[in-house]
Image (cartoon, rainbow, N blue to C red):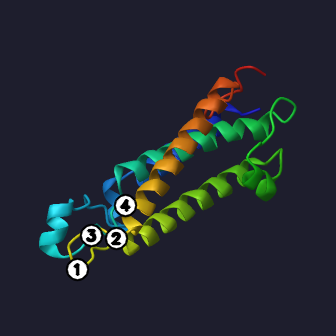
Amino acid sequence: MYSNTRCHTMKALCLACAMLLTGCSTLSLVLPTQVPYDKDDAKEYGEASHSSFTLAEGAWQSLNVIDMGQSLNIANSPTCFHETNPLTSALIGKHPSDSGVIITSIAYAIGYRMISQYLENKDTLDENGEYTGWHDVYNIFQGTMLVTKAYTVWNNNNIGLRPFGHAYKC
């Protein structure tokens, strides 16, 4: 089980990570955080939104931190819970360690950002000032990832996994 000091340290660390990933002012040192242009601005300036940190991405990154906190309960309650995500389970096992959970969550956050940036960079305007098909791919990616992460957090909560605390139903 968590000691109080360890639990508070983990909460503070995860809160700091969430603030950095969701648009804290220091994030602009690493990633641009401008608001995306709308379509009319893009026509005027001849470009689509590039390297913007969107609200959908900020929401996903925040949910990822909550999911990480919930997954730490799996590491500390191996008799009650096990990892069911096939990708995560293949990477860190059904009963992961704390460090495995944290490293995997950070890897997911970085991977998500890299895919988002790649799709944003492909999202350009054609000669008529219309977005290319990559705009739809980008929106589908953001929507799908946000809905699946929200479902994961909701489901974890329903089975008794609480972020950064003790398992509720164990």
Residue 82, position as x, y percentages in the image:
81, 38
Mark sitting earlier along the chain (1/3)? 3
Front residue of 28 and 145: 145
Seen as rendered, the residue at the extreme top is 169
Q: What element carries label 1?
A: loop
Compared across the picture, whether 81 is left or right of 40 comes to right
Count residues near mark 4 (Cα–Cα under 10 Å), then give few for <14, some for 14-19, many for 20+. some
Helix, strand or loop at mark 3: loop
Question: Which of pointers 1 and 3 indicates the residue nearer the eye?
Answer: 1
Residue ID at (31%, 61%):
33
**Mark 1 crowd level (few <14, some 14–19, many ≥20, 10 Å Cα):** few
Question: Which of the two discs, 4 and 3, sits closer to the camera?
Answer: 3
Gap between marks 4 and 1 measured at Cα: 34 Å
Q: Which residue is drawn at 41% across and 68% down?
A: 134
The mark nearer the N terminus, 3 or 2, is 3
Find residue 99 and report its horizontal and vertical position in percent.
72, 53
- For marks 4 and 1, the one nearer the N-term is 4
Amino acid type assigned to the residue bearing label 4 in the image: Leu
Q: How far apart are marks 3 and 2 (CA)?
A: 10 Å
Question: Which residue is disc 2 drawn over?
Answer: 132
**Please, is residue 113 above or below residue 165 in the view?**
below
Q: Which of disc 2 and disc 1 is earlier in sequence?
A: 1
Evaluate if marks 1 and 2 touch, with contact meaning CB atoms under 8 Å apart: no
Residue carrying label 4: 27
